Amino acid sequence: DWSSDVCSSDLMMCPFVIVFTKSDKIKLDLVSEKIKLYKDSLLSYWEDLPDTFVTSAWNSKGVDEILEFVNQSIKKYTI
């Protein structure tokens, strides 16, 4: 129920991921480098990182992986 306040148990049942979009906009060798910079930065605040996906609308990179994650999450978290 979105009209009520969020409690910590609600958040535990909601998968959280990071999606790096537009991977086709930079050179392939820079994708990994930039992702590492983001992850290193986030680790200065977080103990663990969520799953990450790299996507591109131009060549559909990452679409199948995200859809599989969503399908598995629905199965896992459906009450």
Image (cartoon, rainbow, N blue to C red):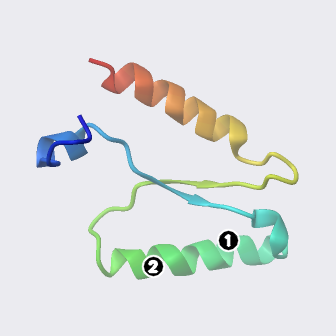
Residue in the image at 79% along x and 75% along y: 29
Name the quadrant of the C terminus: top left
Q: Is residue 19 left or right of residue 32?
A: left
Q: Which residue is mark 2?
A: 40
Labels 2 & 1 near each other (Cβ < 8 A)? no
Q: Say if 10 sits above or below 27 in the image.
A: above
Residue in the image at 51% along x and 33% along y: 70
Number of numbered tags placed on the structure image: 2
What whole-number distance in Å separates the C-alpha atoms at marks 2 and 1?
Answer: 12 Å
Residues packed near mark 2 inside 10 Å, few (<14), some (14 to 19) or many (20 plus) = few
Q: Say if 25 sits above or below 5 in the image.
A: below
- Numbered badge on residue 62: none
Q: Position of residue 56 (x, y in %)?
A: 77, 55
Q: Is residue 35 left or right of residue 64?
A: left
Which amino acid does the dot numbered 2 rest on?
Asp
Q: Secondary structure at mark 2?
A: helix
Residues packed near mark 1 inside 10 Å, few (<14), some (14 to 19) or many (20 plus) = few
Residue in the image at 39% along x and 75% along y: 42
On the image, which quarter does residue 46 sit in? bottom left
- Numbered badge on residue 32: 1
Q: Position of residue 75 (x, y in %)?
A: 41, 19
Q: Position of residue 1 (x, y in %)?
A: 23, 34
Q: Secondary structure at mark 1?
A: helix
Q: Residue furthest front?
A: 3
Residue in the image at 32% along x and 81% along y: 44
Q: Position of residue 69 (x, y in %)?
A: 52, 35
Compare residues 44 and 67 and report the one nearer the observer: 67
The earlier-in-sequence mark between 2 and 1 is 1
On the image, which quarter does residue 23 sit in? bottom right
Which amino acid does the dot numbered 1 rest on?
Ser
